[in-house]
Structures are given as C-alpha cells and as structure tokens.
Amino acid sequence: LKKIKSEKFSKFYYAFYLNLFSDIGYSKSWSQLTPTGLNNRLLYSAGLGLDFVTYYDKVLRVECTLNHKGEAGVYIHFMAGI
C-alpha cells in the first residue's frame, strides 16, 4: 500500500496452511419412516484443504472432500475474526 506512509501497512502479510482432515461417525435411527440409506451405518469422509490467512484473522478456505459413498465435493468458506 504505497499511499499509506506507515510500516504497519506498507507490506501485505499473509500465510497459507495446508490441512488434511477426516471425520467418522455412526448414524443410529430407530424410525424407518425416512429411509435415506444413511441410517444405522458407519459414515466417514476425508479431505484436503488450503487456508489463506490475512489481516485480522480473515481466512479464505478451500476444501476438497470424499465421503463413504464415493461422492466428492469442493467447498469454499470465508471467515473473519471476531
């Protein structure tokens, strides 16, 4: 930022973080009224993500996941610090 004559704002600070994650759980249902194919079975997924962090803990996150059914997804999140 060339217009602002302060050392605090003269450089753009950022960081990248690579994430590897997994989730696992069991879905227990006593009701058979809504057969979704997800009842009474083990559910799991795994994925890879990349976080871009900048001023005031603002984070742009991109994640790619794969679940137990073989379905893949790409998700984009934006979070700002409190």
Image (cartoon, helix red, strand yellow):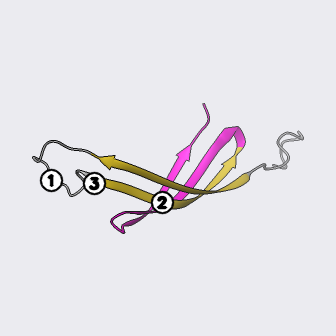
Q: Dots 1 and 3: beta carbons under 8 Å?
A: no
Q: Quadrant of residue 66?
A: bottom left
Return the x and y of residue 43 as percentages of the image width and height.
35, 55
The residue sitting at 70% across, 47% down in the picture is: 54
Foreground: 61 or 17?
17
- Quickly name the residue at label 2: 46
Q: Dots 2 and 1: beta carbons under 8 Å?
A: no
Return the x and y of residue 49 as percentages of the image width and height.
57, 58
Query: How many C-alpha atoms fall within 10 Å of the one at disc 1: few (<14), some, or many (≥20)?
Result: few
Instruction: Return the mark for residue 41.
Output: 3
State the extent of the magenta-drawn residues as a range. Answer: 55-82
Return the x and y of residue 79 as percentages of the image width and height.
56, 42
SS label for mark 3: strand
Q: Quarter holding the C terminus?
A: top right
- Quickly name the residue at label 1: 35
Instruction: Give the mark toward the camera: 2 or 3.
Output: 3
Foreground: 73 or 10?
73
SS label for mark 2: strand
For badge 3, the amino acid type reads Arg
Q: Is residue 15 left or right of residue 61?
A: right
Residue that lies at the very extreme toward the bottom in this rendered image: 70
For badge 2, the amino acid type reads Ala
The residue sitting at 25% across, 44% down in the picture is: 28
